[in-house]
Image (cartoon, grey):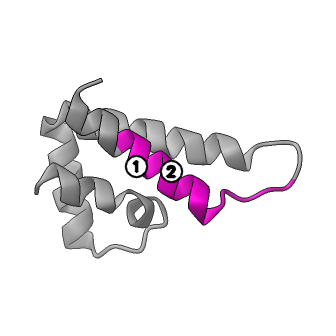
């Protein structure tokens, strides 16, 4: 699996909407790709923490898109 495909599936992975074959492929990719593993950990932690705020809130689709863009930029630019 290519990293760009992997990163595009983060949200679906968190929502458990992927087939078992794709989940297995992602898990295998995470074992060997440190960048994707770190990006996914950051992404999932951000989503988890945003859900634990005192005021009820949801992560807006715009925020998710900004986060995804930022992570991909850092992933491919090596920052």
In whole angstroms, how far apart are the C-alphas of marks 1 and 2? 5 Å
Magenta span includes 63: yes
Label at residue 4: none
Label at residue 66: 2
* Residue drawn where x is 16% and y is 59% of the image: 25
Q: Is residue 22 left or right of residue 48?
A: left
Q: Position of residue 72 (x, y in %)?
A: 32, 44
- Count of numbered badges drawn on the protein: 2
* Residue drawn where x is 58% and y is 48% of the image: 47
Q: Residue furthest top?
A: 79
Which image quadrant: the C terminus?
top left
Mark 2: few/some/many CA within 10 Å (<14, 14-19, 20+): few
**Magenta-tinted stretch:** 56-71
Q: Find disc 1 in the rendering and name its residue.
A: 69
* Residue drawn where x is 27% and y is 63% of the image: 23
Dominant secondary structure, magenta: helix
Taking 72 as reference, is 34 above or below it?
above
Do the numbered discs 1 and 2 sit on residues whose CB atoms are within 8 Å? yes
């Amino acid at each position: 699996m290519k990293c760009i495909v992997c990163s595009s599936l983060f949200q679906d992975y968190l929502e458990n909407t992927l087939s078992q074959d794709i989940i297995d492929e992602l898990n295998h990719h995470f074992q060997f790709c440190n960048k994707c593993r770190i990006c996914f950990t950051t992404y999932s932690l951000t989503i988890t923490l945003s859900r634990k705020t005192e005021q009820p809130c949801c992560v807006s689709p715009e925020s998710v898109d900004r986060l995804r863009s930022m992570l991909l930029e850092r992933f491919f630019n090596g920052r």
